Image: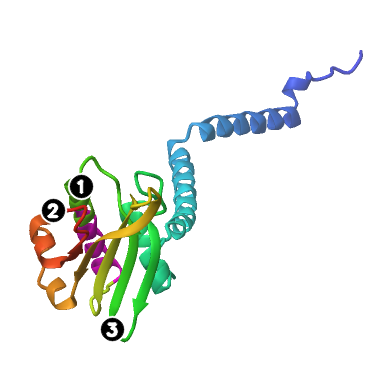
Amino acid sequence: MGKNIEPIYKRKWFIAVAVLFFIGALMATFGENDPTQEAENNGEKMAQEEDQEEQIEPDEEAEAVDPMDGLESIDLIEYLVIDTLGEETNMGETRIIEIKIFEEEDELVLDLHGNENLTANMMKRSMIMDSKDLIEVLIKEAEITDREIIIDWHLELVDQYGNDVVRNVLLLGLKPEDAERINWENITTDQFEDLTLYWKHPNIFD
């Protein structure tokens, strides 16, 4: 009689391999759905995202540069004039004619083109209002507190021969001792005119 051969599924080594395979499958299944592991993975992911944000933020803050940083006095004044009144008038004239600083006289003189308007009085009032806004900015932003600020306004006129000429029409100035007493939030345009008006063209303005 031949020898009986034991089936493979009854052999010890096959059973051991099957048990190990079964245990490994269970561990893989429960490991994928382990809420503790998922929480740890989510926590690590959030920490990595926060680190990336912290690395980006300083670069974004560094890009927000103050345009006035590093400007010399004349350049800073020119920047503030353009920022406050515009680079050009409403007629397309370049706003700034010349900026002059007289050290001995402690004066800052701005030669500027003014805006055209419907009437002479409206032009004058517009230039006075612009002067008020600009002088306040120069005092607060450029810290011009130790010299007189003078604004010489110019307009394009027609002379006696019919030619277009640029002439100064209005002169205003504010001394340091008057500037420090002004309440900029309350002073009116008329009060500012009485305080600062030096001269007006007699043939144009009343």
Residue at horizontal 20 percent and vertical 43 percent from the top: 119
Residue type at numbered disc 3: Glu
Residue at horizontal 27 percent and vertical 72 percent from the top: 143
Q: What is the CA distance from the residue labelled 1 to the residue labelled 3?
A: 32 Å
CB contact under 8 Å: marks 2 and 1: yes
Residue type at numbered disc 1: Ala
Write the start and end of the magenta stretch as one range.
Answer: 129-142
SS class, disc 1: helix
Q: What is the CA distance from the residue labelled 2 to the residue labelled 1?
A: 8 Å
Of 28 and 131, the residue lying toward us: 131
Q: Which residue is mark 2?
A: 206
Q: Is residue 20 above or below residue 132?
A: above
Q: Nearer the viewer, mark 3 or mark 2?
A: 2
CB contact under 8 Å: marks 1 and 3: no
Residue type at numbered disc 2: Asp
What crowding class fits label 3: few (fewer than 14 Cα within 10 Å), some (14-19), or many (20 or more)? few
Q: Nearer the viewer, mark 1 or mark 3?
A: 1
Residue at horizontal 35 percent and vertical 48 percent from the top: 89
Residue at horizontal 33 percent and vertical 52 percent from the top: 160
Q: Which residue is mark 1?
A: 120
Of 179 and 193, the residue lying toward us: 193
Would residue 83 be seen by someone viewing this image from the given angle? Answer: yes
- Residue 105: give its label: 3
**Dominant secondary structure of the magenta stretch?**
helix
Nearest to N terminus: mark 1 or mark 3: 3
Rendered image coloring scheme = rainbow
